[in-house]
Structures are given as C-alpha cells and as structure tokens.
Image (cartoon, rainbow, N blue to C red):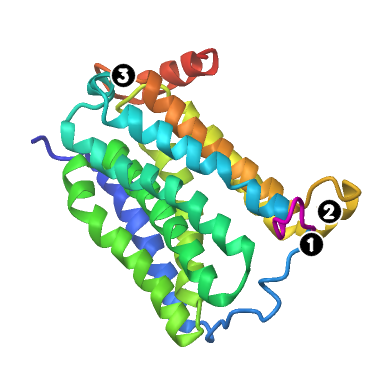
Amino acid sequence: MRRMPLAGRSKSLMLAGLALVACGVALALEPIPQPPEYNGFADSRPILGIPNALNVLSNLPFIVIGALGLTHLFSRRSAATFRESWERWPYAVALGSVFTVGWASFFYHWKPDDASLFWDRLPMTTLFTSMLGIAVIERMSAKWGRRAFVPWVALGVWTLVYGQTRNDFRFYGVLQGMTMVGLPLVLVLFAPRYTRGFDLWIAVALYGAAKACEALDEPIFRLLQGAASGHTLKHLLGAAAAWKIVSMLRGRVPLAHPNPASARLETSAARGAP
C-alpha cells in the first residue's frame, strides 16, 4: 500500500490536533446536566388519539428510508457501489441507525421522558459517528478508517451512557460538535474515491438545517401559526438528509483516479445528476 503523501499526512495531523483540542475542551468544561425542560416541545397536540402527533408521525420517513437503504445495500446492485465488499458494513451501521432512529424517536415522542430519550439518542449517536467514520474510510485512509470505525462508534455510545448515568452530557455534546465540524472538514480536505460526493454536502446542509429547526422549535411553531413546529421540521429535514445518502449509494461508482482535479470534475457532474 502506498504511503499517504506528505500533504495528506499534514491534513490528517491537523484533524488529529483538532480532536485533541476537543478532548481538552471536554475535560475542562464543567459538567453539563440534562435541562429539566428538554422533554417539553412546542407542539403537543394529539391527532386521532396519537399524543404529540406530528412529532410522532414525522419519524415514519426514517423507517421507510432506512429500510430502502438497507435493501439496496444488500442487493446485487450494490456491488458496483463499493471498491471493497467490506465497505458496505459501515453503511449498514449508518442505515440501520436511520431505521432504528425512526422507531426510537416514534416511541420517545409518544411519551417524552429522560429514559426514552436515551433510546432515542442511541441510534442517532451511532448514525453521526458512523458517517464521520465512513468519510475517513472513503476520503482519508481505508486501512486506518477500517481499524478506527468500531472504536469511534463505541466512543460515541460511551459518551451517551456516561451522560445518562452521570447526568453529565459534556462529552456527548463535544462529540456531536466534533462530528458536525469534522465531517465537512474531511470533505473539504480530502479528494473523493467515488462519484456523487456532492450528495454528502447536501446531506450535511440538510442536517445543519435540521439542528437549527430543533433549536428554534417554538419560534417556528409560532411563525407557522401552528402548522408545524421546529422539531417536526427537524425530523423531516433529517429524513431528507438520510435519503440523500441512500440516493448517493444507488447512483455512485468508484472514481478511476481520485485526485483534486477529479474531485472538482465529479462535483460539477454531481450537481447535474438526478
């Protein structure tokens, strides 16, 4: 296997340095408890006997999209999607997490409390950690990304378990922040090995919009005069981000010669791709 070029190693060291800084920040922070009002949402209206109906029902797209993604992943058509057959397994974790998020969030919003919130957050944690792990595999180093994938996802689960048992979510919050910053950085700094890379940028943008809607739950509910809350829109935008990942997998192929020039070329092509 060829050694990573000096520029690539420098970029990797920069990302490793940022990760160490994030760890230092997490250790320096005071404990961050779960806000007591977290489980209260702007829209709690029942529909046909379903409590918090729009927040509950808006999770159904995750279940459908996750099932469609897993069906494609283990079909014969997916053989052209990956350079190595083992590369489908990190996506199995991600798409399995999408499917599970739908069910977990469905039941959480049926009766929101701290206990069900843990099970809602668990597949979300494996989803965002697995997506960063996939980016490392596909953009930085397949060898080292493969080795780091399971420990990285396990670290995400540990931060959630620690937060739940100690009522201290600083490590969980910092890990989420690392993922939200780290994934775009990997996309910017490293050339793709597959076509349709621009779909990942769309997924990142949709997820960022989903997080903004989550933070603006009540203001959006008032702005839309009760038609939908920010949290409901968060679910729909998050599902749209998941669909972009599935549609990327259904249409992408390996690049013959991954390099910065081909990255620019495939991005331009992806803009016009269906």
- Foreground disc of the pair 3, 2: 2
Q: Residues within 10 Å of mark 2 (few under 14, many from 20)?
A: many
Identify the disc placed on residue 42.
1
Query: What is the x, y in percent for residue 273?
Result: 50, 14
Whole-angstrom CA distance, mark 3 to mark 2, is: 41 Å
Dot 2: what SS? helix
Name the residue beneath numbered marker 2: 221
Magenta highlight range:
45-52
Q: Amino acid at mark 2?
A: Phe
Residue 168: x, y in percent? 50, 82
Rounded to the nearest angstrom, the CA distance separating label 3 from label 1 is: 43 Å
Q: Is residue 27 above or below residue 215?
A: below
Q: Quadrant of the N terminus?
A: top left
- Picture layout, residue 116 above or below residue 241: below
Q: Residues within 10 Å of mark 3 (few under 14, many from 20)?
A: some
Nearest the viewer among 17 and 270 is 270
What percent of the width, then of the height, locates residue 246? 43, 31
Does the residue at mark 2 contact the one at mark 1 (Cβ under 8 Å)? yes
Whether tag 3 and tag 1 are in contact, CB under 8 A, the answer is no
Q: Residue flagged by tag 3: what amino acid is it?
A: Val
User: Residue 13 is drawn in which quadrant?
Assistant: bottom left
